[in-house]
Amino acid sequence: MTTEAFVEIRDVVFRRDQRVIYDGLTASVPRGKITAIVGPSGTGKTTLLRLIGGQLKPESGHVCVDGLSVQSLKRSALFDLRKRMGMLFQSGALFAELSVFENVAFPLRVHTDLDDDLIRLVVLMKLEAVGLRGAVDLMPSELSGGMQRRVALARAIALDPEMIMYDEPFVGQDPIGLGVLLSLVKQLNQALGLTSLVVSHDLQETLSIADHVIMIANNRVAFQGSPDVMQTSGDPLVHQFLHGNPDGPVRFHFPAPSLENSVS
Amino acid sequence: MIDWIAGVGRSTLSQLSDLGRATLILMQAIFGRSNVGVHWHLTIDQIHVVGVLSLSIIIVSGLFIGMVLGLQGYTILTDYGSEQALGQMVALSLTRELGPVVTALLFAGRAGSALTAEIGLMKATEQLASLEMIGVDPLRRVVAPRFWAGVISLPILSLIFVSVGCLGGALVGVSWLGVDSGSFWANMQASVDFSEDVFNGMIKSVVFAVVVTWIAVYQGYDLVPTSEGIARATTKTVVYSSLAVLGLDFFLTAVMFGEV
């Protein structure tokens, strides 16, 4: 089955200082599907989300979102495009001086003309969806890390965006919270037809809801396809990652000279 | 020798690059998409934070500096039998130099460092990145209101500093040391020219306000988002602002009052 891509990434080269993160990365994110981005730590999964959001620019190559070349957009057009995206940051990134209610209401206040009653209704609905309606008057500092991420999720979906990028949404969640979030991500995708990108190390949980998987390793896309195909893949790199083997084509150690040379 | 020249070149290029980035950030913050109507209340909030909350340190400092000027001025002027000119000396010192300069230095320490730390912490906790992804430009939403608040607040604080300083001078000179009240105030009124002294002092204050607030918001926005980065940027704000204020003060004084 071919699906129109919402995000197209072509031949992207990206470096941080002298360290190569991507060397010709090519991938596509199908529209209206849940795409899991997986891979070993430090391979640039969060970086990929930031390239898609236009917060970073590639050295070469193209990142297109809904047909728009992100790195070619003017500043104002880029901010307009971002209104159609939601992003859940690893840290939650809630506004520290605003209450839970005001954090979720923030995108509605700045981008819509809704009256206060309607904003209150929408905010309470979003908080209800993440199970935190009772925390509406608390400040972010009064919440646990996992609860902060759930509030951040409510804020990310406040404007009903076309695409949501989740950066480690399941970290710090207890089993109940994890289950609720998994079903919420799935429901958002099915009910609203959202395109979802989930970066997560909770492999089994993420693959259970994903329609498409992009695995990044060794500066490139190591695998791209459905979770079922990934589970049965004979690729040694994919096999090593799925089974958590320390030895294999994916390096566990950060590049360094040999131990003998370092010691002597 | 070659290494030394290369080092100087690298350092110069780095400074120029910083200046260019700071200019771009300021331009994008104040000349981006118009949002005066939407963001005026944010500017008012920031005027409260950087201006109103700096009032106590400005009033107390102004009072003591005025009192010290009164005391020192009286001691010197008495030697020449001209203690009646104390009001003139206190007022001119404050309006031309001490008011704008000391207020700007205090502002850099009290409000400038706080602006840098606040913006830096927002960057370190991804709040600025979060704003960007919500489709809100942090330069317009966070940096611009703080910049304008600083530019508006500092000249007003400077005026308050000068006024309180004059009262401090009168308190010591007239109430304590016995200088004639009429002479003190009449001399002050006769010698202080509005355009020559007060207006030039205000121009200095506006220039210092732009420079100090610009340095503060740039250092916060451009810092390395770690605890050490925030500490380093906060220190830079105070050091760079102080040096810039003192250097610019000499330049402006030479232009305004330099003709012999």
Image: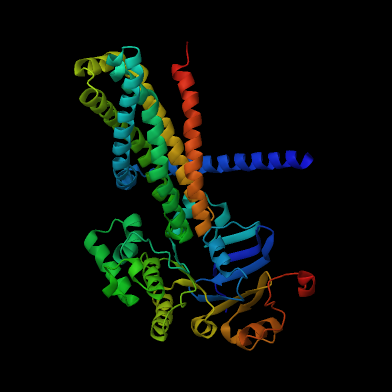
Q: Residue at x 79, y 74 (%)?
A: A260
In the displayed structure, B89 sits above or below A180; it is above
| Foreground residue among B72 and B167 | B72
- The x, y position of residue A102, in whole percent, is 30, 62
Residue A68, percent across and down?
54, 58
Question: Closer to the camera, B219 or B186?
Answer: B186
Colour basis:
rainbow
Q: How many marks?
A: 0
Question: Which image quarter: residue B171?
Answer: top left
Q: From what the image shows, is residue A94 above or below residue B189?
A: below
Q: Position of residue A261 (x, y in %)?
A: 79, 70
> In the picture shown, does residue A142 fall above or below B169?
below
Q: Quadrant of residue B52?
A: top left
Q: Is residue B165 left or right of residue A61?
A: left
- Name the residue nearer the viewer: A40 or B48: B48
Up-down relation of residue A88 to residue B102 (above or below): below
Residue A75 visible, this angle: no
Q: Is residue A172 left or right of residue B9?
A: left
Residue at the farthest front position? B79
Residue at 39% x, 39% y is: B106
Residue A263 in picture, x, y percent from top left: 76, 71
Quadrant housing residue A243: bottom right
Quarter of the image that includes the N terminus of chain A: bottom right
Does the rendering let one see residue A42? yes
Residue closer to the observer: B168 or B244: B168
> Which residue is rendered at x = 37% and y = 35% of the image?
B103
- Residue A194 in the figure: left or right of residue B52: right
Can you say which quadrant of the picture contains the C terminus of chain A?
Answer: bottom right
Q: From the viewer's perspective, is A95 left or right of B228? A: left
